[in-house]
C-alpha cells in the first residue's frame, strides 16, 4: 500500500540506508567514544524502524486518506460483527467509487493503486467474516467468485501502466469498466447475503431465547441496523424480523420489551416490505390491544402510536393494509386521543398526535370520531401546556388535525369555544436557527391559515376571528417575508384566509389593503407580496 509510490524503490532505499549506516559505524567505531557511538547508532536504528512502519501501513495522500485498511481484532468482530461488516463494506464501496471516477479521467496510476487497495480490503473482509462465522455454501461461492474478479481487476489495471497507446487504453477502459461494474454488483450482493445471515442469527436469538437480556440485545442490534437506510430495512423485513418482534409483543412475560420491540417495528415499516409483514401477522390488532390496555406502560403505548403513524403515513404508495386498519380505527383513535390528553412529556404527545394527524388524511370517519371525543378541545388545551406541546413539531401535528377536522361543519362550534389559540399558531416563530424548526413553523402558520379560511365560512367564526385581530396578523404575514420565513405556501394560505374573511366582513379590511390583497386576482396579489423585500406594515 504505497499510493502511487513504487514499493520496490522504497524497499531498495531501506536496504541502501541500512548498508550505509553499518559501513559508517564500522569506519568510525574506533574514533569516537562509546556514548557518542551509541547515540549515532540509535538515531539510525530509529530511522530504520520508521521505514519499517511505513512499509507496514498505507500512506494516505489527498483524498486517499479515508482508504486506510480498517483492522479489527477478533474480539471486536465477535462482539459487534454487524457494525464491523457495515464499516468494512463502506470502505470497499468508497474505493470502488473512486475507481470509477479515476477510470473516467484516465488516471491509470491511480486506477491501479485503487484496485490494489480494493482487492486487499475485499480479501480482508472475506477472511475476517469467514473466521467469525460459518458462512453458507451459496455465500462461499459468491466470495470465491468475487475474489477472482478482484484479482482480475488488479491484473488488468496493471497492464495499463506500461503503455501509452491511446487505442489500447481506450479498449481497456471499456473492459475495466465492465469488470468493475461486475465487481460492484457482486460485492453488493455478497454483503446483502452476509447481512441476511447476521440478521437471521439475531432473529433466532429473539425467537428461541427466554432471556430478556439476550432478546433485548438482539432487538437493539436490529434497531441499529434499521438506521442505515431502507435497503437494510428491506432485508430485515424479508428475513421475518417483524413477525418475531410481534411474537414478543404478544407475550406478557416480555412486557418490558414491548416499547423496544415496537420502536424497531416502526423503523422497519418505513418500507413497504415491513408493512406487508405487519399485515400478515395481524400486527394492527396487536397495536390496538396495546394502545387500549390501561395496564400497558406509557412508553409501550407511545411506541405503538409511532408504528401507527408510520404505517398510515401519506408517503406510502401502497394502501392495502389500511383496509384492516379501518376495522380497529375506532379503538385506535380513541386510545390515541386519550394518550394525547394524558401524555407525561412532549415526545409521547408528538407520537400520538402524529398518528392522529396521519389517520385524519385517509378517512373522514376518523374526523367524525375525533369530534365525538371532544378532540379539538383536548388538542387546543394541550397547546397551552408546555410540558406536552413544547416544540413546533408537536404544534404542526395539532394544526394538521385541526385543518382536516375543519372540513366538517360541526367543527366550527368546537373552535369557537377555544378562542384565540388558533390565532396564536399564526404567530409561531422558531426559537433557534435550526432549518428544520424553521420549516416546522412555516407549516404551522400555513395550516393555521388554512384552518381559519375553512372555518370562516361560518359567519360566527369569521366575526370572532376579526374581533381577535386575525386580519392584521394575516396582512403582516402577507406583506413581511421575514415573518413567514419567505415561505410562498404561507403567503398563499394567508391570502386565501384574508379573502374569505373579507367576503363575510368587507369593512374589516382597509382600502389600501383591499386594493392590493383582495381586489386583484390571487396570482397578482401573490406576485406583489412575494416580490416585497421589506415590510410595509
Image: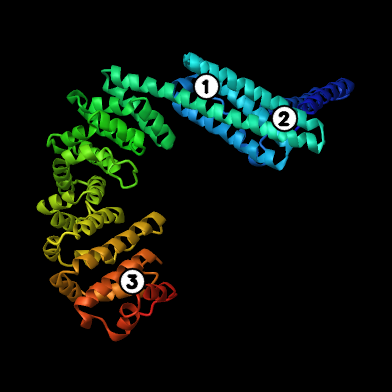
Q: Nearer the viewer, mark 3 or mark 1?
A: 3
Q: Residue 332 location in percent, x, y? A: 17, 41
Image side of residue 1 versus residue 247, left or right: right
The N terminus, quarter of image: top right
Q: Is residue 379 above or below residue 203?
A: below
Any part of residue 135 in sight: yes
Residue at coordinates 44% horizontally, 74% vertically from top-left? 531
Q: CA distance from mark 3 to mark 1?
A: 60 Å
Residues marked 2 and 1 touching at CB (< 8 Å): no
Mark 2 or mark 1, which has the lower sequence index?
1
Q: Name the residue that disc number 2 marks.
A: 157
Depth order, front residue of 45/228? 228
Q: Residue 433 location in percent, x, y? A: 41, 59
Give the class, few, some or many, for how many residues have Cα within 10 Å of label 2's Cα (few <14, many ≥20).
many
Image side of residue 306 versus residue 58, left or right: left
Q: CA distance from mark 2 to mark 1?
A: 32 Å
Mark 3 or mark 1, which has the lower sequence index?
1
Give the class, few, some or many, for how many residues have Cα within 10 Å of label 3's Cα (few <14, many ≥20).
many
- Would you identify the image quadrant in which residue 34 lies? top right
Q: Name the residue that disc number 1 marks.
A: 73
Depth order, front residue of 386/248? 248
Q: CA distance from mark 2 to mark 3?
A: 62 Å
Q: Nearer the viewer, mark 2 or mark 3?
A: 2
Classify mark 1: helix, strand or loop. Answer: loop
Image side of residue 189 versus residue 35, left or right: left
Q: Residue 162 location in percent, x, y? A: 81, 30
Q: Residue 481 location in percent, x, y? A: 39, 70
- Residue ranking furthest to the bottom: 511
Q: Name the residue that disc number 3 marks.
A: 477
Residue at coordinates 60% horizontally, 29% vertically from top-left? 182
Amino acid at each position: 500500500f504505497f499510493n502511487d509510490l513504487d514499493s520496490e524503490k522504497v524497499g531498495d532505499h531501506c536496504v541502501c540506508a541500512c548498508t550505509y549506516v553499518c559501513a559508517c559505524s564500522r569506519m568510525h567505531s574506533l574514533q569516537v567514544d562509546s556514548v557518542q557511538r551509541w547515540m549515532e547508532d540509535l538515531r539510525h536504528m530509529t530511522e530504520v524502524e520508521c521505514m519499517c512502519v511505513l512499509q507496514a501501513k498505507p500512506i494516505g495522500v489527498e483524498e486517499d486518506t479515508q482508504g486506510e485498511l480498517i483492522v479489527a481484532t477478533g474480539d471486536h468482530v465477535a462482539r459487534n460483527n454487524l457494525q464491523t461488516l457495515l464499516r468494512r463494506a463502506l470502505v470497499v464501496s468508497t474505493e470502488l467509487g473512486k475507481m470509477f471516477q479515476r477510470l473516467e479521467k484516465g488516471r491509470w496510476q491511480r486506477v491501479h493503486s485503487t484496485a490494489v487497495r480494493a482487492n486487499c480490503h475485499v480479501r480482508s473482509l472475506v477472511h475476517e467474516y469467514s473466521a467469525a462465522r460459518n458462512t453458507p455454501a451459496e455465500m462461499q461461492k459468491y466470495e470465491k467468485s468475487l475474489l477472482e474478479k478482484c484479482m482480475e481487476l488488479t491484473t488488468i489495471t496493471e497492464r495499463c501502466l506500461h503503455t501509452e497507446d491511446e487505442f489500447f487504453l481506450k479498449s481497456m477502459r471499456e473492459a475495466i469498466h465492465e469488470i468493475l461494474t461486475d465487481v460492484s454488483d457482486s460485492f453488493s450482493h455478497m454483503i446483502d447475503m452476509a447481512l441476511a445471515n447476521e440478521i437471521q442469527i439475531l432473529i433466532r436469538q429473539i425467537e428461541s431465547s427466554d432471556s430478556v437480556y439476550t432478546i433485548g440485545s438482539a432487538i437493539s442490534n436490529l434497531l441499529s441496523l434499521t438506521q442505515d437506510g431502507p435497503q437494510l430495512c428491506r432485508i430485515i423485513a424479508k428475513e421475518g424480523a417483524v413477525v418475531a418482534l410481534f411474537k414478543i409483543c404478544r407475550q406478557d412475560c416480555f412486557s418490558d420489551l414491548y416499547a423496544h420491540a415496537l420502536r424497531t417495528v416502526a423503523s422497519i415499516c418505513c418500507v413497504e416490505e415491513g408493512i406487508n409483514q405487519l399485515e400478515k401477522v395481524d400486527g394492527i390488532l396487536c397495536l390496538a390491544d396495546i394502545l387500549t390496555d390501561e395496564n400497558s406502560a406509557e412508553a409501550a403505548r407511545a411506541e405503538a402510536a409511532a408504528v401507527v403513524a408510520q404505517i398510515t403515513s401519506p408517503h406510502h404508495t401502497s394502501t392495502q393494509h389500511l383496509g384492516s386498519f379501518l376495522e380497529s380505527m375506532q379503538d385506535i383513535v380513541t386510545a390515541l386521543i386519550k394518550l394525547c390528553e394524558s401524555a407525561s412529556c412532549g415526545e409521547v404527545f408528538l407520537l400520538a398526535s402524529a398518528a392522529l394527524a396521519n389517520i385524519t388524511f385517509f378517512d373522514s370517519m376518523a374526523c367524525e370520531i375525533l369530534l365525538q371525543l371532544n378532540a379539538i378541545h383536548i388538542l387546543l388545551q394541550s397547546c397551552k401546556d408546555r410540558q406536552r406541546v413544547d416544540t413546533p413539531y408537536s404544534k404542526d401535528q395539532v394544526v394538521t388535525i385541526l385543518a382536516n377536522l375543519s372540513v366538517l361543519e360541526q367543527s366550527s362550534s368546537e373552535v369557537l369555544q377555544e378562542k384565540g389559540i388558533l390565532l396564536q399558531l399564526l404567530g409561531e416563530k422558531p426559537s433557534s436557527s435550526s432549518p428544520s424548526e424553521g420549516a416546522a413553523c412555516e407549516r404551522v402558520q400555513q395550516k393555521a391559515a388554512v384552518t381559519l379560511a375553512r372555518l370562516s365560512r361560518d359567519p360566527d367564526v369569521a366575526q370572532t376571528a376579526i374581533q381577535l385581530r386575525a386580519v392584521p396578523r394575516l396582512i403582516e404575514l402577507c406583506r413581511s417575508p421575514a415573518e413567514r420565513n419567505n415561505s410562498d405556501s404561507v403567503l398563499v394560505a394567508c391570502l386565501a384566509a384574508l379573502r374569505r374573511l373579507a367576503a363575510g366582513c368587507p369593512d374589516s379590511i382597509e382600502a389600501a389593503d383591499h386594493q392590493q390583497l383582495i381586489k386583484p386576482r390571487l396570482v397578482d396579489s401573490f406576485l406583489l407580496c412575494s416580490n416585497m423585500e421589506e415590510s410595509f406594515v
